[in-house]
Amino acid sequence: MFSVLKFSASVAHAQWASDFEAVRKQEMDSVEHIRDELANIGVDLHSMDEKIDLMYQKVEGIEQSMEMLKPLVPEINQLREALEKLLVPPPTPTSSDAQKIVDTILSFTNLEVPLSLLLDRRCTVIPGALLEANDTCKVYPALLGNGEKVAKKVYRFEVLDRQVLNRDCMRFVRLAKLWCTLQSSYILPFYGIGMESHNDDFRLYMVSPLMQNRDATIYLERNRDKPGMKANILQITTDAAIGLRYLHSLRPQVVHSGMKGSNILITDSGRGVLSGFGLTKALIVDLGPNRTVRLTGKPKKTRWMAPEMFQKDAALETPIDVWGWAMATLEVSF
């Protein structure tokens, strides 16, 4: 009996081995057929294996890089939040915002501010940047709600002295009213005025386009040795002269009275535009023979002043701009 069972098992094993070999050969033939078909259409399985291995290596490298970046995630999130605050346009000022500015200025100066002077968009200072600072104001690079880069000139007011505050607010309004009327390619454009809270007080500011090249003195200090710069200097000073001619041709005439290199800003194309209108005044045409317009502000420097302006109560007239332009031309030419 045992011999019969052993023989039956051997026969069954041989039959299984034969069937297995037949199935294996059939599968190998199918694989070879598929390989031949893929080769006919230009698919290289060996090359695909290499590419898959390379892909796995890249994935492993990315995973390692992500592990290395994990400690930086908090800083990256802080940077992202700061950029979102900077780039997302703040809401447009409402009519109540505009009325608040008008009422504030009116309370100190008794002057009605035309709504046309008010900036119709929010103006956000770019953090950590300052273009200029002096006793009366600070100038910052800023962004309007539409993303345009501008210069934001924030004025300082002595709020504790009512008389000084009234005087400074009146000068601010007078300057804004005059500047907004100046329309020339040789004059820095005026965008508008605004107000922002500061501690328990307020600050007024003016907005104009941002000139990336800064003023003539800075621009030429950086670029004086470049080819063709002598011709550029001539163009800049000529542009300033044309700007003055425009001011003097207005009726009433306008005297800049603050000509110097730092008040000639340089556009992206290297041309000059006049700025710095803090001392600028319009000459009233019907003053009469015994009345004149005088310089009420104090120039920070006297190097560019015409000789007659050193006299007591000197009259403000257009020739002083010619002297100032000549001194500014000497300043930037050498």
Image (spheres, grey):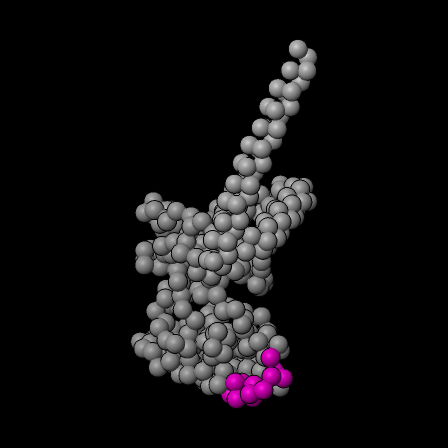
Quadrant assignment, res 331: bottom right
Nearer the observer, 306 or 240 = 240
Residue at x 55% of width, y 43% of height: 28
Q: What residue is rendered at 60% in x and 84% in y?
A: 226
Residue at 32 percent of width and 55 percent of height: 115
Residue 7 in view of the camera: yes
**Can you tell which quarter of the image residue 293 is in?**
bottom left
Using the image, determine if residue 81 lies above or below residue 166: above
Question: Taking 171 as reference, is 31 left or right?
Answer: right
Give the vertical position of 19 relative to 333 (above or below): above
Q: Residue at x 54, y 36 (%)?
A: 23
Q: Position of residue 193 (x, y in %)?
A: 41, 57
Query: Is there any visible trace of residue 314 in the rendered image?
Result: no
Q: Is residue 258 magenta?
A: no
Does 226 lie within the magenta span? yes
Count of numbered marks: 0
Residue 221 pos. (x, y %):
62, 78
Residue 332 in the image: above or below residue 99: below
Residue span colored magenta: 223-234
